[in-house]
């Protein structure tokens, strides 16, 4: 575990400096200023003391045990320092120094050097090229970092691959006067990794919500394992930068590893992480998670003392997937007795601007008692003619009962309403400056509630599949040096995995082609089969819809002439028309498995890009979700009197493809394009399979 | 003009009160506290003085002239007070009192009463049920409002239909330490309207940007006229609440008038207003508009001293329609001489965390000189080991040159970096706490730049249209009490407006039907024509694709039998197949004109809802934009070897429909569904036309 890193009993600093504006000085200042409870050991060959603390010439001269040693000396000297730490028995080093893997081959060699040395001695390494860690626990007060924000204790823990973004997030909580639990930004992450930190916080009771910023994932599988485990216990809010091509390019050049784009989003969804596109929105959601319970559902009761903000909140809540159900007659009856005459008794309850504590309290109690309400949203503007402190006291009291989550759009000048603000804060009411912002935080609470209880389905293991035969086809192709598999191999593999393929055969001559075509039955497709021909249809290597033996013979003859010397064979297949075109594809993602794609063929994929993605292994539920998530899915279900397709079978095919690529990790890309689907059967009429070549 | 309202020389308060927590006291306190430069006249029948100011028993007792008189007495007494103001010669009244039109018929009568009285005397009326106005001009300092935020002078003017939302927006600028110019929230708007206020600010040089919140529009046409005029001079940022059905319902019940939804968005787009869905995002954009010039284009140069935030900003800028072009060789050459070795010399320029004033200045100068860069985005984290004040001074100096707009994601603890913060503020650098937030503000600047120079097209007036004949058909139908026009009228009208209709004729008997069908040519469609039959195809009143006279005769016979006694005639039309189905529709919007709709028929409209909307009059450019904005527009242009349709003609048809409904405002709804489009012609095969009935 990472206790000795996050709860250090002592901290040393190799490269401690007397210069005020240097990192070697700032870190000691931070430890002092934050009130670190243990001893600080500045290491400096010359200075007898730094910032009033006795310094030591070498780490070995330090009298006591060292849990954490910062290293802030030039990169060339780091391997030696790590070795010295190893010899001294230092448990963790935080290498703030930059100039390693992020700077190219030379730096990478230097990084590998110190990592080897550290591992030899069992030193855990954090960084390099990093900020460090912070623990706000009053019993620890570790500020092992050169940043400048001094958070108060709280329940949000932050881990950020980018120190800049981590600092922005930490500063935002500070500006909101919201506490933080722990912080980590581990830069190049040569040893201690983000998943390891997340797992550690998963077991930290004081961490109620984890905020994560990633640009790339070094070991996506390990990350997924940990994220799934921890997200089931507490909310993980994450932002994934690099979602545009330009941003992804920037992220890749910044870090390496699996960057941005679709794969990270799929990982978030599959593991139950709540993903955000905006850092501010993520921070605002975290504030609610840190203070309030998780709602049981998405049905919101709203209380407001001003009209406009209730409209804005309604828009935002509804767009975020929440409902605003009507209140019961029971509730109306109570409110008719407690509200002012001008009040609006419905959901939202408009208590009107002159409402005081009794009106607000009654409205809150009603919403807490309504069974069809899961959470309460409040718009509270502080009218200069109302006793707002008393109102706030009622909010705080109800919040302390922790029956249902409350969020509040608190519209005031905090410099004037200081006491009201303090009461709300003591009552753990998350307060926001804008109605839309408060509503977004509420929808995030609901998203997690939904995620926790979501259906995930099961990975079906289809029987009757000769996996070893499939593997030997692949290995044979590989041994032959083929990256793209031939049609025979491709269709045999599909058939092994239970995917129907339109009747096909190979022939060596036009005569044989005509004969097998007659066996298959007309109409047929004829293709020239040769490794040397890539885009067959562009160069006249495909003839569609041939109706009889004569045309097969004649077309095959033409192809043989055209591709003279290319040693071609002929591929003949039943020509299938009508039906609905589908596509299933799969693509390997390094360190992760495959991404499976499903869509409708033709214009729907070309113009609409109407496709769905999922990570392997795809469960039965996920396969069905992929189908349902298509914009044009009503077409598959059948509309306007047109028959739909066999949806169970379509889902099963997705799962079979998932099993197929999972069993054979050498598959780089697989395409079933198109499959022709009917209300009873689905048949592959073209496919491709590409292997990974090293 | 509204000078006497927004720049009052004196303010009276009818209903002034000695009670601390009453509106009649708060407004006087606000005027005092804000430092109103003119005399304040509390009106109170008993008190000799209020808050240390001499009070008068009636408005008539006031010795001097009165520019603004607040009225805060109960609603029943308001008409009398307005009359008294009229007699006294008060120029404007601000009626804060509620309980008028917003409360139903009785309140509306009361409101009408005082409006009549006010108009008799030429008193301008603001409100009722409103907050009031604020003018921060140091020469005026009018705080005619009961809110609690005391803004410093600035260049943003705010008008909000909802006082609650107006207060949120004003408070947000205050929290950001950004100045405000004027404020208005006019509640029921019985006389002085939002468009009037916008026009006034359009001519106010100190107002650089107008921020608008609307829930509904009383007079959309007037609003459009003013918005178009003012948006051409300065940016109007607007938020339209009620975009969901639930929100729209809330807005309608809150205000009445044209609420939410598509029409308001269309008005914003057509007039050049920059629309927002989020109030916070709108405020953040306003801060940039108030401080910086408008960019000439959307090409952003980025400067950063930390990696992660640059990735986030890149994502946000690109998604917001901006480009991040490479820098020139010239620029690279300069930067190689000025940057630290670890810096990244490209766009973004990563000056690295240790960069000081010379590095930042050189990067800024380079971006200002690059011709392919229109605006500069800066990520500036304040490292504790850098002289940040000097860096800020360089930013401020370059900003003062006003060559290109600058926005900054300023990542710091403002309580520690007070001087750096002050320098940036003095330099009019808009600073934001998050990279995404700063990037969004930048994209808004670019949106306005683009809006100002946007192509709008011209409204074509097609010749050869017999408008008076069309009008007489409509008037005849109206005189007959027909709301839904018969097929004959509908097709005649389409033909008058130059829309081709598949050959058609009417017949009284099966015999005649067969005869006219033969004249038209087969195949034909046969329909039973009768006012008594609504959904013809559901009840067997339509027969498609009839191939000869015999089948026409037989089907017509069956229909006559089926609708025995319903006095039917027969409508025969050429049956048209293949081609691409289009829909053009129009729907009247009260006080506004019509909304014209264009889409593709069949599954595209049913499943995808792939339709485009525009307000009448639709220009040639707008018609083309409607076509281009469809998701499936590539199908209309022709893909996959399929022929496209005649796009010029499709656009012309949209314009003709626009002209049609504009010429005849009695049309409530018009539908051409479907039109069948080919590469040369477009033919209407079904249509409907419904008149407004009073």
Image: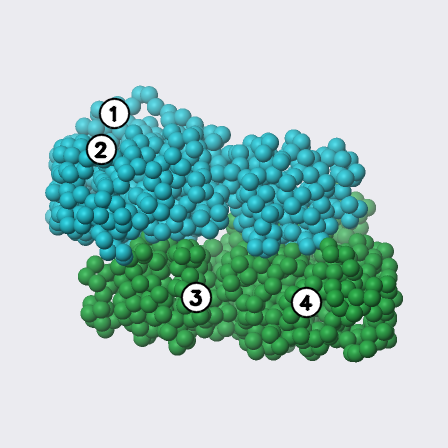
Chain colours: A green, B cyan
Residue at mark 3: chain: A
Q: Calculate the distance from the C-alpha at mark 1 to the C-alpha at mark 4.
A: 86 Å
Q: Marks 3 and 2: which is nearer the front? A: 2
Q: Residues within 10 Å of mark 2 (few under 14, many from 20)?
A: some
Q: Marks 4 and 3: which is nearer the front? A: 4
At x 67% / y 75%, what residue is drawn? A37
Q: Position of residue A247 (x, y in %)?
A: 64, 50
> Do the CB atoms of the residues marked 4 and 3 lie less than 8 Å apart?
no
For this view, does B303 lie left or right of residue B342? left
For this view, does A293 lie left or right of residue B430? left
At x 74% / y 71%, what residue is drawn? A40
Determine whether the residue tagged by mark 4 lies in a helix, strand or loop.
helix
Residue B490: quadrant of the picture: top left
Q: Position of residue B340 (x, y in %)?
A: 77, 45
Residue at mark 1: chain: B
For this view, does B72 lie left or right of residue A477? left
Position of the C terminus of chain B, as image quadrant, is top left
Q: For this rendering, which residue is in front, B170 or B190?
A: B170
At x 71% / y 45%, what residue is drawn? B356
Say if labels 1 and 4 share a chain: no
Disc ID at residue B467: 1
Residue identified by numbered label 3:
A422
Q: Calculate the distance from the C-alpha at mark 3 to the C-alpha at mark 2.
A: 46 Å
> Do the CB atoms of the residues marked 1 and 4 lie less than 8 Å apart?
no
């Amino acid at each position: 575990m990472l206790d000795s890193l996050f709860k250090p009993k002592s901290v040393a600093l190799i490269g401690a400096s007397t210069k005020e504006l240097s990192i070697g000085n700032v870190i000691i200042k931070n430890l002092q200023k934050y009130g670190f409870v243990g001893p600080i050991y500045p290491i400096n060959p010359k200075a007898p003391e730094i910032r009033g603390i006795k310094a030591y010439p070498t780490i070995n001269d330090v009298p006591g045990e060292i849990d954490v040693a910062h290293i802030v000396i030039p990169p060339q000297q780091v391997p030696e320092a790590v070795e010295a730490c190893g010899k001294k028995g230092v448990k963790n080093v935080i290498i703030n120094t930059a100039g390693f893997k992020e700077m190219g081959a030379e730096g990478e060699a230097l990084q590998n050097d110190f990592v080897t040395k550290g591992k030899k001695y069992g030193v855990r390494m954090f960084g390099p090229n990093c900020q460090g860690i912070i623990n706000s626990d009053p019993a620890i007060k570790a500020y092992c970092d050169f940043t400048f924000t001094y958070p108060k204790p709280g329940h949000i823990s932050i881990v950020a691959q980018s120190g800049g973004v981590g600092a922005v997030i930490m500063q935002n909580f500070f500006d909101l006067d919201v506490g933080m639990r722990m912080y980590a930004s581990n830069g190049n992450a040569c040893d201690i990794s983000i998943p390891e930190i997340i797992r550690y916080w998963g077991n930290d009771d004081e961490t109620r919500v984890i905020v994560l910023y990633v640009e790339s994932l070094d070991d996506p599988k390990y990350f997924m394992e940990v994220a799934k485990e921890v997200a089931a216990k507490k909310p993980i809010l994450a932002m994934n930068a690099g979602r545009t091509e330009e941003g992804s390019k920037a992220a890749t050049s910044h870090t390496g590893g699996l960057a941005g784009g679709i794969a990270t989003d799929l990982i978030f969804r599959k593991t139950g992480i709540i993903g955000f596109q905006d850092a501010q929105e993520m921070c605002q959601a975290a504030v609610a998670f840190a203070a309030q319970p998780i709602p049981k559902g998405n049905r919101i009761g709203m209380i407001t003392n001003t009209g406009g903000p209730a409209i804005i909140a309604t828009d935002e809540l509804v767009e975020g997937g929440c409902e605003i159900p009507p209140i019961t007659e029971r509730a109306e009856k109570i409110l008719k007795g407690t509200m002012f005459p001008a009040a609006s008794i419905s959901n939202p309850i408009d208590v009107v601007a002159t409402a005081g504590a009794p009106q607000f309290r009654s409205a809150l109690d009603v919403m807490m008692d309504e069974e069809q309400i899961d959470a309460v949203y409040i718009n509270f503007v502080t009218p200069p003619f109302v006793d707002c402190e008393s109102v706030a006291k009622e909010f705080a009291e109800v919040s302390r009962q922790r029956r249902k989550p409350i969020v509040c759009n608190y519209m005031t000048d905090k410099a004037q309403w200081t006491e009201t603000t303090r009461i709300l804060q003591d009552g753990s009411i998350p307060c926001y400056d804008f109605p839309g912002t408060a509503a977004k935080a509420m929808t995030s609470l609901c998203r997690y509630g939904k995620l926790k209880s979501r259906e995930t389905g099961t990975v079906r293991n289809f029987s009757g599949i000769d996996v070893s035969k499939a593997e030997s086809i692949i290995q044979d192709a590989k041994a032959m040096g083929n990256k793209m598999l031939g049609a025979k191999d491709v269709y045999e593999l599909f058939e092994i995995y239970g995917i129907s393929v339109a009747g096909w055969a190979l022939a060596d001559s036009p005569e044989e082609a005509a004969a097998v075509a007659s066996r298959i039955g007309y109409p047929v497709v004829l293709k020239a089969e040769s490794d040397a021909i890539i885009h067959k249809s562009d160069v006249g290597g495909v003839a569609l819809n041939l109706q009889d033996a004569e045309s097969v013979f004649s077309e095959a003859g033409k192809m043989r002439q055209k591709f003279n010397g290319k040693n071609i064979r002929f591929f003949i297949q039943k020509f299938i028309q009508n039906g609905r075109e589908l596509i299933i594809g799969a693509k390997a993602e390094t360190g992760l498995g495959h991404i499976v794609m499903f869509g409708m063929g033709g214009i729907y994929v070309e113009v609409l890009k109407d496709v769905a993605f999922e990570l392997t292994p795809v469960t039965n539920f996920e396969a069905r979700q992929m189908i349902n998530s298509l914009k044009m899915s009503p077409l598959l279900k059948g509309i306007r009197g047109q028959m739909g397709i066999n949806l169970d079978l379509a889902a099963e095919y997705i799962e079979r493809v998932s099993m197929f690529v999972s069993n054979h990790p050498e598959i780089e890309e697989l395409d079933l394009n198109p499959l022709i689907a009917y209300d009873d059967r689905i048949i592959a009429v073209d496919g491709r399979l590409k292997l990974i070549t090293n």
